[in-house]
Image (cartoon, grey):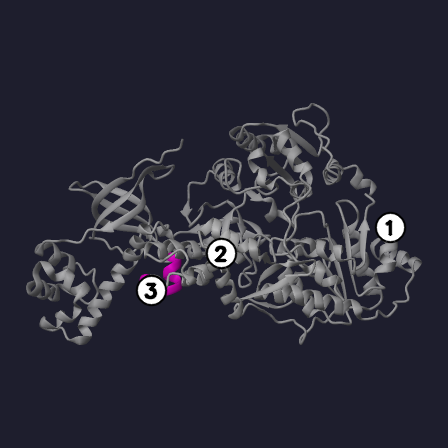
Amino acid sequence: MNMSLPLTVLEGKLEQITYFNKETLYIIAKLKHGNTDNLVTVVGFMGGVSPGEALKIMGEWETHPKYGQQFRIKSYDVTLPASVEGITNYLKSGIIKGIGRLMAGRIVKRFGADTLNVIENYPEKLFEVEGIGKTKAASISNAWKDHHAIRSLMQFLQEAGVKTSYSAILLKEYGLDALNIIQSNPYCLANDIPGIGFYMADAIALKLGKSENEPERARACIIHLMQQLSNDGHVFAYLDQLTARCKNLFQIESEAAEEAIEYLSTAGELLIENKAEVPDKKAVYLKALHQAEAGLANRLKALLSVPVVPQGIDTEQISNEILKKLAIKLSEEQLNVLEKIFSYRAVIITGGPGTGKTTLIRSINAVFKALGKQISLAAPTGRAARRLAELTHRDAKTIHRLLGYNFKDNLFDKNQDNPLDADAVIIDEASMVDTYLMFHLLNAIPMTSMLIMVGDVFQLPSVGPGNVLDDMIKSDIIPVFYLKKIFRQARESSIVLNAHRVLKGEFPLLKHINEPADLSEFYFIEQNNPEKVVSTIVELCTRAIPERFGFDPVKEVQVLAPMHKGVVGTINLNQVLQKVLNPNPVTINATNNSFKPGDKVMHLKNNYQKEVFNGDIGTIISIDSKKEELSVDFYGRAVSYDFTETGELSLAYAISVHKSQGSEYPAVIIPLMTQHYALLQRNLLYTAITRGEKLVILIGMKKALDIALKNDRPRQRLSMLTDRLVTL
């Protein structure tokens, strides 16, 4: 049983602040411990303190590999002086703006040991001091509150059981009045701070004595659960399941939950709809998601209803044009697709690895160019768009950029009133497009244009809500072309061969990496112990793969894990691999990571100002502690990050399979353990394997591999897109 050790208490005077990040409240400081001259390095989250103040810090001792022993702050308190002499010295130090040495003496002379109580609670009494009028008294009172606001907020959060590191987020959102705001209306956090807001709000509200069935709590809980379900890929929730979740997870009675849903529906935040094939089942939508799903369906049906003008080009002409432009002889299957797709307003082309999807995209480009047509190429992610441009030798954009996304207003420049100027739009990696994005894309496609969606429907669905490509295929209203023939060169690849075996639920042909035969592309290392899996991954990255296959362990090898947590999760793997692959001693501590020059990092969200996108992988090329910024090389371009922006980065020696979508890597290592049970699915394993270009190594338990192969029923995503598409 894992028992946490009691915290150690350190008391002393704050001598020096070595480093302080205003955005995160992360501090490195020197504390003069007790009555000795010993200086202790304290690190962690602490704000609203100044040199000279007496502190009581609760925490744990730890050893830093470079800086040695230091004390990790868990919580803290400022010990205010009680004696007249101590109060005088405290105020004379200049800690409280507006109180100089002379003024400090006058105030203490008038109020004695009660001075600090007067400043904090009865500032109007300061008028009794010579030289202090109404304005000055207000200034002193505000300076006192500002100085102690951060400390008071952190102490309040700690008492409520909320991480004190969240103080920075609250201060950024609400300013120094954050404590008053959240005390008066804690559930404002649920709306203002997505994700963690509801949990903070709930802990604070319950601490303040709010009831579990408070209407405000029930409403905040419903919105939180709806957002959580959306993050899990669902477009709606069944009403009875939603109220059951409220009861099971947050002890909110069904009646209170239903009243909250009704209220939110009337207020326009939710929309309730009966599910066609299950009349007694009510579907609850976030309003924006309902608009996106319904709008997507209506727009696609409208596009499909517009007649297509025949292009007047036959199979022979297409074949000759492709041979002339691309020096490629198309297969009968590819020619058949090319000849037919021009007869439709919208089509889907799908197929597994090695079936020629990219060749078809290049061929479609060539045909449209021969016809004098304008074509736009796009993909859901920056990596996928970059790869598409490299393969086609044509400009390709992210869908967001194609549509002119404005990150400030969260709006798209291209829409029904200002459509794209294109005769055809090709979307690669279409399985990654979620409900919101497909809605905005279809809104921007002219009714005279053509939409060609290319993707592998057997891969993982989009990170965002919905299962759009699969739902479109199931609707049977949009022409779908399946590429099934694996080309000869691809058939010779054990990666492609095993990917298709996995797709059928068959065991991949496994070869152990230590077998003396010729080098292969696909290996399996059986290992049942999680710690040994990690040490084997370290051995592969540091020695076996570089020596035997010649791949750079940082730039060309990518570890893909199903989960973030656990011994074989991305978080632990990143920390372990950082130590062995990057011994650089220079380190900065960010909110969730420690970064060093040379680190492999991933950008976590689209940043259009920096022109860096969710999932882009780069290398830290420099860290400047004085300027508080670091620089990352993304595909040959240096991008600067202020230390306050490092929350947009994470270590990327190991990443999740979901984050790898749309990318390919020379070599991938895939740990599979039964601890990953919740995510052991055939499409996840298939997606991971197809990320490897030249080398794939599975490591772990055959039982876990067997579970993944047999689990061909990935968690169903709740969506009504198929129903809407087939409804006349």
Q: Nearer the viewer, mark 1 or mark 2?
A: 2
* Position above or below: 485 against 224: above
Q: Is residue 262 left or right of residue 594?
A: right
Choose between 707 and 243: the one closer to the eye: 243
Rounded to the nearest whole Å, what is the CA distance between mark 2 and mark 3? 26 Å
Amino acid under label 1?
Glu
Amino acid under label 3?
Ser
Disc sitting over residue 333 in the figure: 1
Rounded to the nearest whole Å, what is the CA distance between mark 1 and mark 3? 67 Å
The 10 Å Cα crowd at callout 3, few under 14, some 14 to 19, many 20 or more, is few
Q: Is residue 687 left or right of residue 592?
A: right
- Residues in magenta? 168-179
Quarter of the figure with residue 472: bottom right
* Position above or below: 538 against 596: above
Q: Are marks 1 and 3 in contact (CB under 8 Å)?
A: no
Q: Which corner quadrant holds the N terminus?
A: top left
Report if residue 305 lies within the magenta region.
Answer: no
Disc sitting over residue 184 in the figure: 3
Amino acid under label 2?
Ser
Quarter of the figure with residue 369: bottom right
Rounded to the nearest whole Å, what is the CA distance between mark 1 and mark 2? 56 Å
Quarter of the figure with residue 296: bottom right
Q: Which residue in the structure is indicated by mark 2?
A: 254
Q: Secondary structure at mark 3?
A: helix
